[in-house]
Image: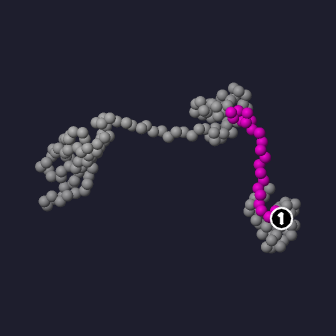
Amino acid sequence: MIDYQTFHQIRQLCDQEKMTVAQIAATLKLDERTVGKWIECQTYQPREQAKRASKLDSHKGTIVRLLATHPFTAQQLLQRLRQNGYTGGYSILKEYVRAVRPPRQPAFLKLHFAPGQCAQVDWGSAGFLPVGGTRRRLSFFEWCSATAAGCMSSSPWPRRRNTFWPVTNTPSNTFIRFRLR
């Protein structure tokens, strides 16, 4: 059997160079019968593999059934199949298990919270502000609850250290006290 590149070399030497079968065979170091066969073919057709029975064929139903009940590893399946008379190898079993194993479901946990049960808090910096002859960092405090969201910015002036800011979108107008950095 020849490969695709050799087929095109035979076709080129025959069609363009006008060489004989014997000359092509000597040039490419092939048998004359092989060259003659491929000159008659207009397109390359690779050899088809013969379908052979596998030692695994009689156990495929058992494998699928076991995988449907539990996510066994290929090694665990091999041990169970050996008890049932399987004489084949591990690698063919592993390839088959990889092909037929049900796809894994994405892992996630959907969270549900009642009002006031959960919140996320973070500090941040929003650059600098000119205050008099100096520059002060503008920091902010962000608080988000599961049912209401509010963003509160801290004051850059040092004389207002403890500040109360209203939280928006809450059932009652709640105030949160926080200390500025």
User: Camera-side residue: 11 or 63?
Assistant: 63
* Local secondary structure at mark 1: helix
Q: Residue at x 77, y 66 (%)?
A: 9
Q: Is residue 36 magenta?
A: no
Q: Is residue 74 placed above or below 15 in the rendered structure? A: above
In the figure, is residue 152 to the left or right of 64? Answer: left
Q: Is residue 63 placed above or below 18 in the rendered structure? A: above
Q: Residue at x 20, y 41 (%)?
A: 173
In the figure, is residue 22 to the left or right of 3? Answer: right
Q: Percent position (x, y) of residue 171?
A: 24, 39
Q: Type of residue at label 1?
A: Ile
Q: Residue at x 77, y 49 (%)?
A: 49
Q: Residue furthest bottom?
A: 17
Q: Is residue 49 magenta?
A: yes
Q: Residues within 10 Å of mark 1 (few under 14, many from 20)?
A: some
Q: Percent position (x, y) of residue 135?
A: 18, 58
Q: Residue at x 69, y 28 (%)?
A: 82
Residue that numbered label 1 is attached to: 39
In the figure, is residue 176 to the left or right of 26? Answer: left
Instruction: Classify residue 46 by image quadrant.
Output: bottom right
In the figure, is residue 154 to the left or right of 87? Answer: left
Image quarter (top left, top right, bottom left or bottom right) of the N terminus: bottom right
Query: Where does the magenta region start and end?
Result: 41-61
Q: Percent position (x, y) of residue 147?
A: 31, 40
Task: Assign the magenta stretch its main secondary structure.
Answer: loop
Inspect this view and state whether residue 34 appears: yes
Q: Percent position (x, y) of residue 103?
A: 57, 40
Instruction: Classify residue 131 by image quadrant.
Output: bottom left
